[in-house]
Amino acid sequence: MFRILLAFCLFSTAASVTLVICQQYCSSLQGAASYDNCAPWNSYALASNQTCYNLCVHNCAAVYDGSCMTGNGFRCCLKTTPTKTQEFVTSGCNKLYNNLPGM
């Protein structure tokens, strides 16, 4: 019984650490502590529309368990493939990332 409780506690701690890391990753911006595939000109976390930030955190923590932070084919944990239906563009997060008008 103790082993099951201990395993559950370790799993819960790892999941919460992943969430915190993903929140920091998704709130990065150009010119500060940034990452190879997530360094937007305007921080998703500071935008008036939190959709891109929430989508990034959700994908990072729940869908990809942090693997999208270092993998190719992602921009702020939003898929950049296939070209015509990539989540990064269809969500509109590319406009905020590149500081383009319209978001």
Image (cartoon, rainbow, N blue to C red):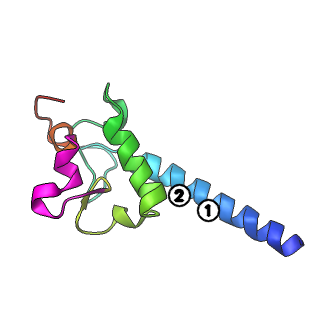
Q: Where is residue 85 in the image (x, y as percent from the top left)?
A: 16, 56
Toward the right, the furthest residue is: 1
Identity of the residue drawn at 15% across and 35% down: 99
Amino acid at pointer 2: Thr
Q: Is residue 8 visible?
A: yes
Write the start and end of the magenta stretch as one range: 78-92
Residue tagged 2 = 18
Q: Nearer the viewer, residue 90 or 49?
A: 90
Q: Nearer the viewer, residue 86 or 43?
A: 86
Q: Where is residue 65 in the image (x, y as percent from the top left)?
A: 47, 63
Please check the rendered image and state whether residue 91 is part of the magenta-colored stretch, yes or no.
yes
In this rendering, is residue 43 above or below 34? Answer: above
Amino acid at pointer 1: Ala
The Cα–Cα distance between marks 1 and 2, rounded to whole angstroms, is 6 Å
Quarter of the rendering containing residue 91: top left
Q: Residues within 10 Å of mark 2 (few under 14, many from 20)?
A: some
The answer to whether marks 1 and 2 mark residues whose Cβ atoms lie closer than 8 Å is yes
Q: Position of residue 47 (x, y in %)?
A: 31, 29
Q: Which of 40 and 10 is in front in this view?
A: 10
Q: Position of residue 9 (x, y in %)?
A: 75, 62
Toward the front, the furthest residue is: 85
- Indicate which disc residue 14 carries: 1
Is 27 situated left or right of 82 in this image?
right
- Indicate which disc residue 40 carries: none
Is 36 situated left or right of 22 in this image?
left
